[in-house]
Structures are given as structure tokens and as C-alpha cells.
Image (cartoon, helix red, strand yellow):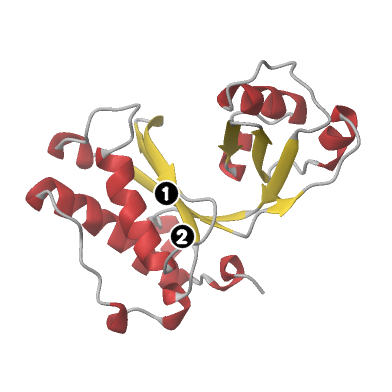
Amino acid sequence: MSLVDIIDRHAAEILLNLAVESIKQGLQASRALIVDLDKIPDSLCQPGASFVTLKLDGQLRGCIGHLEASQALVLDVVDNAALAAFRDPRFAPLTASEFEMLEISLSILSTPEPLAFSSEEDLLRKIRPGIDGLILKQGAHQGTFLPSVWESLPEPEGFLRHLKQKAGLSEDYWSDSLQVLRYTAQQIKPSTREDAA
């Protein structure tokens, strides 16, 4: 059983609330949120890797995370929330007015595993649309797409082409030394009234 399998609704709410508090703390005090691990469920104090995605009006506003666990999951989420809001190099730091309309989602990652394949066609057959997140590596080039990217790139061919471009390679690039790792993620979003009913 992986950490991804043990994030229940209560733990998910704790993580989401702390992500929100981390961003609020950054807006109000320009410093990191301090988390008392003694008050956090043990399952969230285990090493874990996460990504925090921020959207405004359905458009990406920040996304930062780690592919491998390096600290307690709860600390990873808190750190990544602040980084996504204030340090994503693609965007200006989040403002208080943007915060009011912000959509926050978390992705809790499983441990990436190498994917064996003999050709690009074989790789495309082994990719599981809607399930797999991929890490593509070629020399100094690296890129990843979370499983949630399947929502906008539902076909394996398009998913792989865009991932190559994200890694700084041409979309038709191929080499037998290309490395691909796959992982899954539990996506956590705020509950709606319908979810609570």
C-alpha cells in the first residue's frame, strides 16, 4: 500500500486547509507557515511527494511540486502551496484579490517507476490515459505531466508530443536512450456542497 492509497477524506481536508493557510500566511506575513506535526495525523507525517496546482477562471496560475518524497507529506504540501503562489517563475506573485477567486488542487504522487519499452509505438501502447503521470528524461532534458493533464490532452500521442516539448525536445524526437517513468496521483480538490450531501 502506498501513501496515495491512504489519504482519506479527513486527511485530504487537512491538506487542503493547510495549503490555503500557507498561501494566506504568505500574503499576510510574507513568511512560511509553521506546522506542528504533533497535531497532524501520522499518515500525513510520512514522507510524500506532492504538486499544488492553482487556477484562476480555469486557467493555470501556478503549479509547483516534487516528484519524489523528501519530507513529510504535510510539509511538502505547505511548501509547494507557497511556492506555487509566490515563486512559480511563469507568473507574478499571487495577489490578495486573486486569492479570493483561487482554485486549489493537490496531487499526491506515488513513487515513480521506470517504464520498459522497445519503441515509441510500444511506449504509446503502455501509457494508461487518465491514470499515468509521466516523467521523460533525455540527458539534461526532463519534463513531467501529472495525470490531470490527460483532461486537456486525452490521446497518448498528443500527451507524449507535448511532454517532449515541455522537456525541451522536439515533438518528433526519439532515441533508444530515452527514459520514461510513470506514477499515479490522488487528486484532491475542495469539496462542493453536492459532495457533502
Sequence-first disc among 1 and 2: 1
Type of residue at label 2? Asp
Note whether 132 is above or below 16 in the view shown: above
Residue 86, image quadrant: top left
Type of residue at label 1? Ser
Residue 102 makes an appearance in the image: no
- The percent coordinates of residue 163 (x first, y second) are 63, 28
Residue drawn where x is 24% and y is 56% of the image: 22
Callout 2 crowding tier (Cα within 10 Å): few <14, some 14–19, many ≥20 = few
Residue drawn where x is 84% and y is 46% of the image: 116
* Left or right position of 173 against 42: right
Q: Depth check: 188 or 62 in front? A: 62
Disc 1 is placed on an element classified as strand
Residue drawn where x is 48% and y is 51% of the image: 66
Q: Depth check: 21 or 70 in front? A: 70
Residue 163 makes an appearance in the image: yes
Note whether 172 is above or below 41 in the view shown: above
| Placement of the N terminus among the 4 image quadrants | bottom right
Residue 156, image quadrant: top right
Residue designated by label 2: 195
Q: Depth check: 191 or 6 in front? A: 6
Callout 1 crowding tier (Cα within 10 Å): few <14, some 14–19, many ≥20 = some
Residue designated by label 1: 105
